[in-house]
Amino acid sequence: MSRIAELTERAAALFRELDDLPLKERIDAVNRIRRRLHEHSPFAGEPVDCVQWVPGPQVAGNDYNPNTVAPPEMRLLALSIEADGFTQPIVAHPQRDGGYLIVDGFHRLCVGKKPGRIRQRLHGYVPVVAIRGERGNEADRIAATVRHNRARGVHSVQPMTEIVVALLQAGLSEAEVARQLGMDDEELLRFKQVSGLPALFRHHDYSQSWD
């Protein structure tokens, strides 16, 4: 028997003990085993390598997500999860109180927590992968949300404007905001113009007017 086959057989014998545990303890054990496996994985630097099942009430949405989903798309999302299961985990920042703050997947969370067959099937849990910002502050969390959403979502102009303003007022440079949010200089300038706040232009270089 090869070394890999031997390890797999020993692990299978251990995992069979999970079947005798009550549901909540079994879920907790599965999460802990996944975290231990993650520590030894060649892909330990990738959040998706360690999906955890978290009680729905411990996962909260944020108040700075500019992504919008129309009712028909929400119904389609619910149908997709009901028919195919959760194929994408919720991406979230772990909080000090043991909860999670969503970076990406608010609408998936809504579907998972809504009373009905899906929540019953999930036993009240939702799949979560945890990420941490470069510094773990609110600006990093906001930027992570926007990065996850921009490539595929429809962003309302006003919420995006508010995010740009918040990041600039938090002390990030224009270059840093543009890099974090995946914008070019012209796009960032348009959001500043929409804000109508003169203070955002105090360091802006203006061309000389014609005589």
Image (tube, helix red, strand yellow):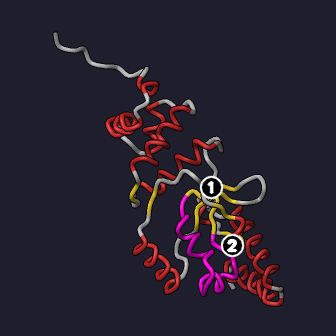
Q: CA distance from mark 1 to mark 2?
A: 15 Å
Is 22 left or right of 121, judged from the image as shown? right
Residue 74: percent from left, percent from top = 46, 73
- Graded by Cα atoms within 10 Å as few (under 14), some (14 to 19) or many (20 or more), the crowding at tag 2 reads some
Which residue does the image show at 64% across and 41% down from the upper left?
135
Q: Secondary structure at mark 2?
A: strand
Which image quadrant for residue 189? Answer: top left
What amino acid does circle 1 point to?
A: Ile
Q: Is residue 178 above or below residue 95?
A: above
Residue 208: percent from left, percent from top = 24, 14
What count of labels does the image hold? 2
User: Outermost residue, left direction?
Assistant: 211
Which residue does the image show at 38% across and 39% down from the upper left?
191
Q: Is residue 51 above or below residue 95?
A: below
Q: Secondary structure at mark 1?
A: loop
Is 13 left or right of 197, judged from the image as shown? right
Of the image marks 1 and 2, the number of the one nearer the N terminus: 2
What amino acid does circle 2 point to?
A: Trp
Asked whether residue 109 is drawn in magenta, I would say: yes
Is 34 left or right of 65, judged from the image as shown? right
Q: Nearer the viewer, residue 126 or 162?
A: 162
Callout 1–callout 2 Cβ contact below 8 Å: no
**Which quarter of the rendered picture does the C terminus lie within?**
top left
Where does label 1 land, which residue?
131
Q: Which disc, if any, is residue 53?
A: 2
Which image quadrant for residue 125? Answer: bottom right
State the extent of the magenta-drawn residues as a range.
Answer: 104-127
